[in-house]
Image (cartoon, coloured by chain):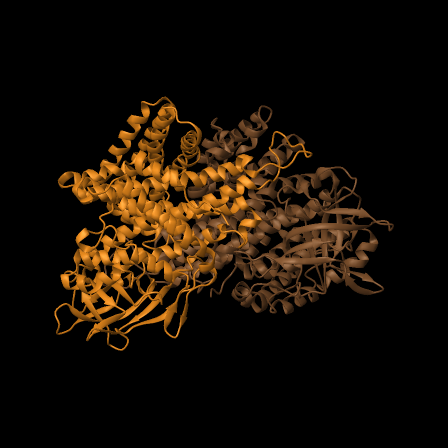
Chain colours: A brown, B orange
Amino acid sequence: MANQFYSKRNLQFLLYEVFDTESLTQYNYYQDHARETFDMVLDSAEQISEKLLKPLLTEMDRKEPQLVDGKIKIHEGMFPILKKFGEDGWINAGFNYDEGGQQIPSTVLSSAAFIFQAANYSSSVFPFLTSGAANLIRSFGSQELKDTFTPKMYTGDWQGTMALTEPDAGSSLSDITTTAEPTENQGVYKIKGQKIYISAGDHDGCDNVIHLMLAKIKGGPSGAKGISLFVVPQKRTQNSELISNDVITAGVYHKMGYKGAPIAHLMVGSNDNTFGYLVGEPHKGLSYMFQMMNEARIGVGMNATAIGTAAYYASLEYAKERPQGRVISDKDITKPQVQIIRHADVKRMLLFQKAVVEGSLALLTQCSMYADLASVTEGEEREHYHLLLDLLTPIAKSYPSEMCCLTTSAAVQILGGAGYTTDFPVEQFYREARIHPIHEGTTGIHGLDLLGRKIIIKNGKSLQLLVAEMLKTIEKANSIDRLKPFAQKLQVYLGKADTVTKHLLSLASKDLEIFLSDATLYLELFGIMTISWQWLVQAIKAEEALLAGATGNDFDFYQGKIFTLRYFYEYELVKIDSLMKRLLSEDNVTVEMEAGWF
Amino acid sequence: MANQFYSKRNLQFLLYEVFDTESLTQYNYYQDHARETFDMVLDSAEQISEKLLKPLLTEMDRKEPQLVDGKIKIHEGMFPILKKFGEDGWINAGFNYDEGGQQIPSTVLSSAAFIFQAANYSSSVFPFLTSGAANLIRSFGSQELKDTFTPKMYTGDWQGTMALTEPDAGSSLSDITTTAEPTENQGVYKIKGQKIYISAGDHDGCDNVIHLMLAKIKGGPSGAKGISLFVVPQKRTQNSELISNDVITAGVYHKMGYKGAPIAHLMVGSNDNTFGYLVGEPHKGLSYMFQMMNEARIGVGMNATAIGTAAYYASLEYAKERPQGRVISDKDITKPQVQIIRHADVKRMLLFQKAVVEGSLALLTQCSMYADLASVTEGEEREHYHLLLDLLTPIAKSYPSEMCCLTTSAAVQILGGAGYTTDFPVEQFYREARIHPIHEGTTGIHGLDLLGRKIIIKNGKSLQLLVAEMLKTIEKANSIDRLKPFAQKLQVYLGKADTVTKHLLSLASKDLEIFLSDATLYLELFGIMTISWQWLVQAIKAEEALLAGATGNDFDFYQGKIFTLRYFYEYELVKIDSLMKRLLSEDNVTVEMEAGWF
C-alpha cells in the first residue's frame, strides 16, 4: 500500500505562494484567521485522514453497503469517522460564528476536503453532502426550518443529501414527476415520487436523513419553472419523537467503484404519508439547488483530482522502487536492472499524471479563491469574481473528471500486471475515478452549459474577464527569461481558441443543433487552455523561487514545476491543434448520422 | 442485459466483401473449404456463445476463481464449455488433417474467436491458450513430445499455458531466473523457479496443465540468448499414471476484471522434483516463444476489439431505448422526451466506438489474411506477407487495446449513472478492457518494438510494403467520387507520418534514448494511420455496393460505413496533427526529467 497520498508541499505552494490565501484575512469576515489557523485546519485533516480514513480505503471497497431489512448498513469503520467529522466541526466550519461555524474560507476547507478525498474518497462524501444540504436550508429556508434541521446536521447526527434524480429524469431535470400537494399547514406539503442514485440517501451511521428534494407543486408551471425545493426528512418529529416520514429505501446500488458510499433508491410517499417543508418560495427550487450544485460541481472536480493524486503517488512510489529492464543507452545484461523511473516512457506517464492533477488542483484553488472573494467583496468586483467562477465551473468539474480517468489508467499501466490486481490500490482508483464524468452533470451537459450559456451570457463578459486574467499571466511570464517561450506559446493558442469560439458563435444563429454538436470538444479545448494558464501561473512562482536561489528539496520541488510546465505545453497544449481542426470543420457527421445506420 | 453482442453482418462484410477470405480456398491446404464451411464455423461459434458463454458473463465476474487446498476452483459453468470446446474440435481446428485438425484458415478461426470473446471474454481464453501451447509443441517439439502431450490437449482434457513472467522479470524477459538442470535423460531437465500471472495456470476444469515454460539451462549464455523452452506439465506420467510434477499453485490473483479466468502464481521445483522437457534446441526458447507470442498479440488485439464491440452494442441498444431530454432545436417541454440516440453528443460517442471497433476488426482480419497467405505462399510473396504481419503486429495488439479502454468508457458514459452500476454490463466491459494494454507486452514495449525494430529491419522494407498497400487503396478510392476527399486526406497524412518517421530515424544515430523516448506516441500515430487506411478499404466496398443500388438493411449498413469513415477522418485522423507537433519537437523533457523532481 502506497504511503504518500497527497503532497502537503504542493498544497502549501498553491495556498501561500501562488494564490495568497492569507490575503483573505484582510476582509472582516476572515479577520480572526491567519496562516496558522489555516495550517491547523489542514494538519487536522491530514491527521484524521492518516489515522481513520486511509486505513479503511481498501476495506470499504471490499465490503460494500448492503440493504438489510429496509435499512442500508455501511462499513462500521465509518461510525467513528462520522462522529469525528461532527465533533470537530467540519460540517459547518465555513458558516458564520452565530451558527456555530468558524468562518473558514472555502479555499482552505476545500483543500482540507482534498486531503480527505485523496485518503478515502467514499468516506469523504458523507460530511460534505450534509454541509451542502445544510447550506441550502440556511441560505433559503425559514428560521423555523433552520432551527429544526441544521443543529443536528452540524453535529453529524443527521445526514444531508441532495435528492434530484428520478428514473425518468436524469440529465433532464425539468422532467421530474415527484409531486408536492399543499396541506392545511402553510409551507407543508405531501410529497410523492421516486428518487434514484441518492448519495448517502440512507445509512445506519446517522439518526435521520434530511433530503433536500426537488418536486413539483401540483398545478404549478410545467418544466423547470415548476420545480420547488423541499426539506424531506426520513423521519419527522411528532410530539418530540422521531417517527417515520414514509421515505422508504427501495434499494442500494452496487457500483463499479466508490463502493463505500451508500447510494440509495428511495420511494417517497408510497403510503401517502410523506411531509415535505418548502424551502424559500414555490417554483424557485432549481435556482436554489444550483447554489448547491455549483459548489458540488467544483467538489466533484476536487474529488477526481484527489483520486488522481493518490494514484499518482502510488505509481510514483512503485516506479521508484521497482527494478525492471535497463536504460536504452546501456543494455548490458550483466548489470543489474534499473528502477523503472529511469525509463522515459514511465517518466512520461508520471509527468502526465502530475501535470493533470497539479494543474487541476491549481485551477480548483483558483476557483475557491474566486468564491471566497465573491463572498467578501461588493459591487463590480464581486460580479467579476462571480462571472469568472460561473464560467470556470464546467471546466473545473469536467477537466479533472475526464482526465483523471486517464491519469489513473496511466497509474495502472506503470504498475503493469501488478496494477491490474487487487494487491495494489491503483485499480481501485481507476474504478473510482470513472464516476466523476457522470455525476453532478455529465461531461456532455457541461459542454452545453459552457458553449450554450456561459460563453454567451452578459455579451461574453465572463470570457473577456478570463482572457484578461490569462493575458496578465502571459505578460508577467514574458518578463521572465525561461518562461518567455511558454508565454508566447500560450498567447498563440489563445488566438487559436479565439478563432474557434468566434467560428462556433457564428453558427449559433444559423443552426443551434450544429452549433452545439461538438460542445464536448469545445469544453475539452477550453479545459486544456485553462490548465495551460494555471501551469504558467505556477511556473512564475516556481521560477521566481529558483532565481532567488532555492536549494535542496525546494530546488527539486520548483524544478519539478518547471519540467511539468514543459510537459504540459509539449504534450497536452498541442492537442488543441487537432481539436481546432475538427471544431472548424464543416462536416456535421454526428448531426447527420441516423439511428438506423449504426 | 444487452442482446446483441457482435454484428454477424459486419463479420461477413469483412470476410467476404472486403478481404475475400474465400480466395484462400484456391490454395491446396484450404482446398476442401468454401464459404459454406466457413459460415458453419461461425454459426457454430455463435450458437455456443449464445447458449453457453454469454449467459455466464456476469456470473463469472461475480464468482471469481478461488484457491482451495492448493487447487484453483473455477466457476462450474465453465465445465460444459471446456468440454464442448474439446469435443467440437476448436482447439486444433487450424491444424493439419493428420493431426486430427480441420485446416481452417486462421482468418475464419479468429473471427470465430472474436464471437466467443465478445460473448464472454474470460471463458474464451481457455481453449486458445491450449491451442497456442500445442502449436508450439507441434512446431518445434520432438515426435515424442507431440505424442505425449498434444492429443489430450486437443480434446481439452489438458490445459495449455504460456509460462513466461517471473516476479523480477515482467517486461524484461532476459532477466528470468528459472533454471533448468540437465538430467541423465537426454532432453529432460530439472526445473526450478517461480512463474507469476499465468493465465489458466491451474484449474479444476481439466486433468492436467501443460506449461510451455521459459527457463535458463545452467551454464548457458546470459540474458535472452540463454533462454530455452520446456514443456513442464503439472502432472507427469509415471508407470502410465499421472503423478505430481512438483508444480505448486502458490496463489490465484484477484483482479479488476477478466475475473472468470484463473491467473496463477506457480512455484516450480520447490521440492526439487519438477521435470521439464526441452522443446527444440537449447537457448532458442525465446524465438520459439515469439511464434506463440505474435499469435497471442494479434489475439489480444482481438480480445480488446471483442470487448469493445460488446460494449458498443450494449450502449447502442440503451441509446435507442432510453428517452431523455429533447432535441436542441425543439425544447418544447410539453412534448415527450426523445431517445438519447437523437443527441449529437451521444451519436458522437457511438460513432467513436463503432469507428474504433470496426476499424480494429478490419485491421485484425487483414492481419489474419496475411498470416494465412504467408502459410500457403512461397518465396518473395511469402516474405512480403510475413513482413507486413510483423510490422502490423504491435499496432494490431496496441491500437485496439488502448482504444477499447476509451470506447468502453464511452459506453459507460452513454448509460450515465446506470452505466456505473452493476445492473448493466458496460462497467464490466470497462474493467475487462483494461488488461489488454498490459498483457502480451505493454504498450510501451510495443512502441519500442515498432520504432526500434520493425521500422528499421530489412532497411525499412516492411514499411515500404505497407505504404505501397496504402497507396493502392488511396488510388482506388481516388477514382470514386464520394471517397476522393478521404483518399486525398489520407495521402496528406501519409506525408506527415513520413516526415515524422524520417525525423525520428535521424535521431537514432545521435541519441538512442531520445530516439525512442516517445515511441509510444509514434505507435499511436501509426495506429491512427493504419485504421484510417482500413476505413478507406472498407468504404470502397461500401460505396461500390451503394452505387450498385443497395437497399433496405444493406443500404443502412453501407451508409453506416461511409458515415463512420467520415467520423474517423474528422475526429481521429486529425489527432496526428498534435502527435506530429510533439514528435517533431526538440524538447526532451521526459528524458531530462529526474526522479527527485517528481
Q: Position of residue B225 (x, y in %)?
A: 18, 59
* Residue B401 in view: no
Q: Position of residue A270 (x, y in %)?
A: 73, 54
> Which residue occupies 47% across, 64% down?
A2
Q: Position of residue B525 (x, y in %)?
A: 35, 40
**Does residue A81 appear to the left or right of A306 in the view shown?**
right
* Residue B426 in view: yes
**Does residue A349 appear to the left or right of A363 in the view shown?**
left
Q: Which residue is at the front of the view, B568 or B304? A: B304
Q: Position of residue B520 (x, y in %)?
A: 35, 46
> Which residue occupies 66% across, 56% down?
A129
Work out which quarter of the rendered image holds the C terminus of chain B and state it.
bottom left
Above or below, comparing residue B205 to residue A190 in the picture:
below
Corner quadrant of residue A153: bottom right
Above or below, comparing residue A99 to residue A471 in the picture:
below
Q: Which residue sits furthest bottom?
A: B271
> Which residue occupies 49% across, 37% down?
B348
Q: Which residue is at the front of the view, B201 or B522? A: B201
Corner quadrant of residue A112: bottom right
**Does residue B232 appear to the left or right of B581 in the view shown?**
left
